[in-house]
Image (spheres, coloured by chain):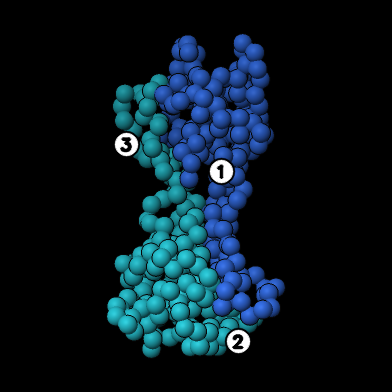
Chain colours: A blue, B cyan
Amino acid sequence: MNEGVEWAVHSCLNLAWLGDERAVPAAKLAGFYELPAAYLNKQLQALARAGILTSTSGPRGGFRLARPPEKITLMDVVAAIEGEEEAFRCTEIRHRGGSDSGVRSKTPCEIHTSMRKAELAWRRELASQTIADIASSVEGHSSAAPERVRRWFDDTRT
Amino acid sequence: MNEGVEWAVHSCLNLAWLGDERAVPAAKLAGFYELPAAYLNKQLQALARAGILTSTSGPRGGFRLARPPEKITLMDVVAAIEGEEEAFRCTEIRHRGGSDSGVRSKTPCEIHTSMRKAELAWRRELASQTIADIASSVEGHSSAAPERVRRWFDDTRT
């Protein structure tokens, strides 16, 4: 999985703590973790295209969450960054070569079906966890985290 | 996911139907689907290293299942080909830059924990499905499949 997924989830978490009163520039979101801003900006644009962030331009422009963190799942973020494609690609080799009985089976490939079952379990689990859930778990063992994030974003100029 | 996973699962399925009386050369397993033999051979060697296949050399050498198809799960095959590494790699960016409070948190990263939960659901599902299950699903809608495979491997010279 693309490292952009880790960056994107962390950035959504920070935007959740920063609230929707301010737009945060990509450079500042990147600066918090010393990430390359241009590359993080690509991930943020992908999140905006997926309707997870809103993006405003201009000197006070930047990114905000487009909806409450309770409504953003890990599946949303992963799909925005990685695409919707299944991890297992069935290329239907069962219809190639000696294996081909001449009659194309209309039943689905059982291997593809089994792999898809596992992928659905993964997607279901990702879809059951929201940015708000993660925020609240972090706050559970590090109650100062939101305030520390807000202070850094208030005080730091990039 | 590497296309070798699809090839490897199909090859295990064919070896299940062929039984353990004969060793099947990589070139023949590849020929059945018109796959590149050298590349399939790499996947078969990986399955052998993982203890899923046994490999014998010599003029009548080749590959066999190392254990009954009831004892080979999709997880075994995927891990043999793709490795054991998690799909989501946590690089702990939370400890970088402005985010670092100076004190390394001993609690696990909550994002990593959430991503791992999903990955475990995927692994559990893959581990619950065996080559024998897939064989029996295929036979359920295509009862001639095992015999067709056996005939092709009996009759074809590569």
| Residue carrying label 1 | A82
In primary-sequence order, the first of circles 2 and 3 is: 3
Left or right: A84 in relation to B61: right
Q: For the residues marked 2 and 3, what is the alpha-carbon distance in whole angstroms?
A: 58 Å
Q: Indicate which disc residue B106 carries.
A: 3
Residue B145 picture quarter: bottom right
| Residue carrying label 2 | B144
Mark 2 or 3: in front is: 2
Name the quarter where the C terminus of chain B is drawn.
bottom left
Q: Are marks 3 and 1 in contact (CB under 8 Å)?
A: no
Q: Position of residue A12 (x, y in %)?
A: 55, 31
x 49%, y 74%: residue: B31
- Amino acid type at image mark 3: Lys
Q: Position of residue B12 (x, y in %)?
A: 45, 74
Q: Indicate which disc residue A21 carries.
A: none
- Amino acid type at image mark 1: Glu
Residue A108 picture quarter: bottom right
Circle 3 SS class: loop
Residue B75 seen in the figure: no
Left or right: A73 in relation to B109: right
Q: Is residue B151 above or below residue B33?
A: below
Chain for disc number 3: B
x 50%, y 36%: residue: A4
Left or right: B9 in relation to A20: left
Give whichever of B40, B109 is nearer the camera. Answer: B40
- Amino acid type at image mark 2: Ala
Q: For the residues marked 1 and 2, what is the alpha-carbon distance in whole angstroms?
A: 40 Å
Judge the density around disc 3: few (<14), some (14-19), many (≥20) Cα neighbours within 10 Å: few
Chain for disc number 1: A
Circle 2 SS class: loop
Residue A36 seen in the figure: yes
